[in-house]
Image (spheres, helix red, strand yellow):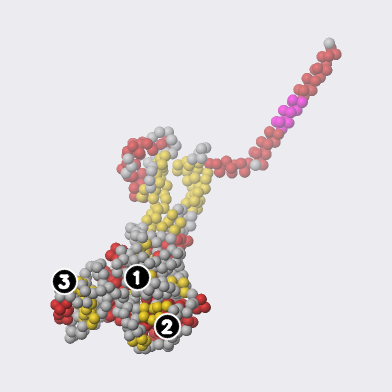
Amino acid sequence: MTGLREPRERALRLRRRLLLVSWLLVAAVLIARAAEVQLVERAAWAAEALAQHEKSRVVPPARGRILDRNGGELAVSHMRAAVGIAPREIVDREAVVSGLVEHLGVRPATARRVSAGTDSWNVVPGRYSMTQVEGLRGLKGVYLEDEPSRLYPRDGLARGLLGVVRDGVGRGGIEQSMDSVLAGRNGREIVVRDSRGRVVPGQVVVVQPPVAGRDVVLTIDQDLQAIAEEMLVAAIDSTGARGGDMVITDPGTGEILALTSVVDGSNAALSAVNTTYEPGSTIKPFTTAALLRYGVALLSDSVDTGDGSWRTEGRLISDIGGGGWLTLHEVIRESSNVGIAKFASLMSSGQQYTSLRDFGFGTPTGIPLPGEASGVLRRPEHWTPMSSHSLSFGYELSVTPVQMAMAFGALANDGLLMEPTLIREVRDHDGTPVRLGRPRPVRRAVPPSVAEALTPVLVDVVEEGTGTRARMSTFRLAGKSGTTRATGADGRYEHAKGAYFASFGAIFPADDPQLLFFVRLDRPQAVYYGGETAAPVTRATLETLLSARQAPIDRKALALAARHVPPPASPAPLVRFAAAIDDAPLDAWPASPAPEGYAGAMTVPVLEGASVRVALRRLHKLGLRVRLEGGGMVRATLPGAGVAIAVGDTIRVLTREATLVVPADAPEAPGRGG
């Protein structure tokens, strides 16, 4: 028995020793790992533990303001406050509840819900102004967190031009193009979190303060912008158009004073910059400038327009009626497609292309807005035999309203094409200008003598031609109307009724230009010709502008440019003249009284329903010229009753017997380039 017990005891002692060694080894490993964690990896583990309780987050800066040329605020950033409640920290619960109700306007039930219970953190719904939360400062358990908010004080004014801010980033318009200037620089702060990862109220350390964005001052005049938007909307409503654009510039500097677009009832887009169309007859002054520039023709040179149609290269170009022999001056005044096409055939394709390119067609203007379209002007090697003719009256090229405005501005600026200026200056946080926008000439499109020669031609368009509905009794305007077919999404011409663009460019005043207007209407219904629909928008805008107290014009210089009113003259002979007649109202613009202080001004008398003989007698007695259209009873006059006129003005008398004919600035029969 003793012999068997000894081996068993030795085995037991061995197992005990092995177990002891195992425990010692495990203890040694644990001690070694503990030493490694406590001594070697101490800093790393301490950093990770701290990271679990602290979080670095971005602090957005206050975004810079957008101002108009006179310092008026168009877009501003205000700080709004988020209100958090820590119920466990509240000392006076009733004071907190009453404060939330009184200062924030929240419901009593909501105030009690967020301030009651054992939750460590609740958020009051909504964001509040600094004035609202001022009365909550100092209350135990109430925490305020400031957040920047973008506001537009003029309630939608220049919406498409300004753009919007989403998630702190500018989208569209100036907000996008100047985002890097307006945005400023983010700051950084450290917040403390509890064991559940929730932010501990009040435990915030600012590591790097944010830097506010800089202010951007635009060349826009907010009052003129408001007038332009109002007049454009009125024109769209009056004509039934789908949309439209208006651009107003200072032709001498290229500054954009007003820029607005309406697309399907919204002013959030900016089709004046990013949508192209074929300009139609508004391109004819630039074709004429090319003829004069290269000495190919003089304004006194004549062409035979025959019966108002010309078949060439297998295609028919047509006008209204038969024009006979017309000088180049008369071709522009009457907007003859046949006449301008025949004159254009005297130029080489290189001369015609170079001149149009020099006016900026086919290239971006450089306006500092996103998405600008460059338009299309093909090089001569891609032209067809008809391209020269088509280009002469505004087909086979596409433009934007801004391009047209700058091109007309070159004619008003002695032939010097300017780059559009929209940013007047950038100001630092203390108001110090850090960048100034200066006028930037692009090139000389034509010699000053050519621009000077074209001025009386464009004045004649307004005085006697297709733009008479823009005529003012006090000042002379120079301008040109245009009507062109609209194209659909597939690039083909639309054949629906009223599928036209109507446009009008005007220089005001003609003798000493201060403002340049370009108006385009998209698919006006009923009467859709540029001279009948787009031209009155210019006049209505000018009349409103001149009656405003503050306007971006030099009134002293304007007084010197006022029209000289001649004394009453003997009645002019009766002139018969074809015009577009339609059952729709011919003058949707409100009557405007004669401006005070201008001698010889009067208003058109009410003649509707009178006989032609009575109407002629009354108008001649007032010293007015008459263009009679038809015979019988008077249906309407252009301008309409009550509109301001001056002695020597021409009144169109429309009768019930007049028939519908197409005006000279309308496109010819469907076909490319028509």
Q: Residue at x 78, y 21 (%)?
A: 13
Name the quarter where the C terminus is drawn: bottom left
User: Which residue of the protein is positioned furthest toward the right in this rendering?
Assistant: 3
10 Å crowding of disc 1: few (<14), some (14-19), many (20+): many
Disc number placed over residue 344 in the picture, else none: 2
Dot 2 alpha-carbon crowd within 10 angstroms: few under 14, some 14 to 19, many 20 or more: many
Quarter of the image for residue 298 reads bottom left
Q: Secondary structure at mark 2?
A: helix
Quick one: SS at disc 1?
Answer: strand
**Residue 579 drawn at (x, y percent):** 27, 76
Q: Residue at x 35, y 72 (%)?
A: 483
How much space separates mark 2 and mark 3, taking CA atoms?
A: 45 Å
Determine the CA span between mark 1 and mark 2: 23 Å
Closer to the camera in the image, 205 or 323: 323
Residue 318: x percent and y percent?
Answer: 36, 78
Q: Amino acid at mark 3?
A: Gly
- N-term-proximal mark, 2 vs 3: 2
Residue 58, given in percent of the width and then of the height, sits at 49, 51
Residue depicted at 44% across the width and 58% down the height: 170
Q: For the magenta stretch, what is the residue range?
A: 18-28
Instruction: Determine which residue is flagged by label 1.
Output: 502
Q: Position of residue 353 (x, y in %)?
A: 47, 79
The residue that disc 3 covers is 609
Q: Are marks 3 and 1 in contact (CB under 8 Å)?
A: no
Q: Observer-nearest residue: 479 or 584? A: 584
The amino acid at mark 2 is Ala
Q: Is residue 26 something that shows in the picture?
A: yes
Disc nearer the start of the sequence (1/2): 2
The answer to which quarter of the image holds residue 137 is top left
Element marked by disc 3: loop
